[in-house]
Amino acid sequence: MHALASALVAVSAASTVVAHGYVDELYIGSQWYPGSNGGTPRDGSPVRPMPADLAYVYPNDVNSDSIGCGYNGKNPVEVTVDINAGDSVTLHWKGDRGPSGDDHERWGHYEGPELDYLIPCDGPCDQFYTWKENARAFKIAENGLDTSTGRAPQSYWPTQPAGKGTWAQTKLSEWQGSWWTVTIPKEIPSGEYLLRHELISLQAANEQSKGAQPYPVCIQLRVNNGQGGNPNMTPLTQLYKKEDMFVNIYPDGSHPDGIEWYTIPGPPVYNPNNERRMRKVRHEKKAHH
């Protein structure tokens, strides 16, 4: 019985690992780089390590420094990569799903948003420890439930995705082959930043004993040719509230397809046009006085 129990525990643990995923490769501009090696740094990679068990940040920790870059990403890696403001980073999430005949290595969850932030390193990112510093961030992109489409079909998922639309994570895995592209804004100051790319999976967010599953990953970048700007910053420990991690997306009598809209958590996306308008208003007020 002891041997059988041990085997069952091992199978359960293995299932937990493959049910998640990690960024295993990426392009910064047009240049390829290796991604994370699970819980340890990978030679030549600007990607900070993700948890060794590929786990998410638990809801009880969303107001701790772990929410910044995950449990294993608080410390720097040696590599910081140059990128021009306005260029893109394209990341590949390796998981355990995929269509028949595919490699079954696409991101394994399908209900939830995708979010992107920049964290100023205030100097070299290879000396920036998110657990030591007063780390703060601003959001540069977000994608949630696209209600311009109908409810997504079941496809290769265990169940049909809930929600009256298509989730960003369904697009990531099914539409885009587990690749996602993030554009670095032009109107930011030049300097070194962590690109904080995140998936928040919602398949257990309706259960108070579990909650949503944030998967943040951080990439060390040196942004050149930025056009300036003054984005509003939010401390990493204040990006989310614990209650953001609990929402029921599933069908009921009133919503047979599941929720009809979803409010993406966190601060608003940085909009340099708003900043320009505010500067103009302040200038006009000073001129009037």
Image (tube, rainbow, N blue to C red):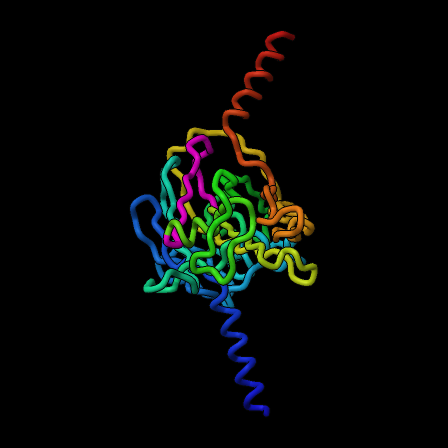
Locate residue 28, reporting x and y percent: 35, 47
Locate residue 227, reporting x and y percent: 42, 29
Residue at 49% from the left image edge and 74% from the top image edge: 14
Locate residue 213, reporting x and y percent: 58, 57
From this viewpoint, is residue 215 visible? yes
Q: Quadrant of the C terminus?
A: top right
Tell me if residue 277 comes above or below residue 120 in the rendering. above
Residue 232 shown left or right of residue 93 in the figure: right
Residue closest to the eye, 31 or 215: 215
Residue closest to the eye, 32 or 136: 32
Tell me if residue 235 comes above or below residue 209 in the rendering. above
From this viewpoint, is residue 144 visible? no
Q: Is 152 one of the magenta-colored residues? A: no
Locate residue 199, reporting x and y percent: 51, 52
Residue at 34% from the left image edge and 49% from the top image edge: 27
Q: What's drawn in magenta, residue-wise? A: 177-194
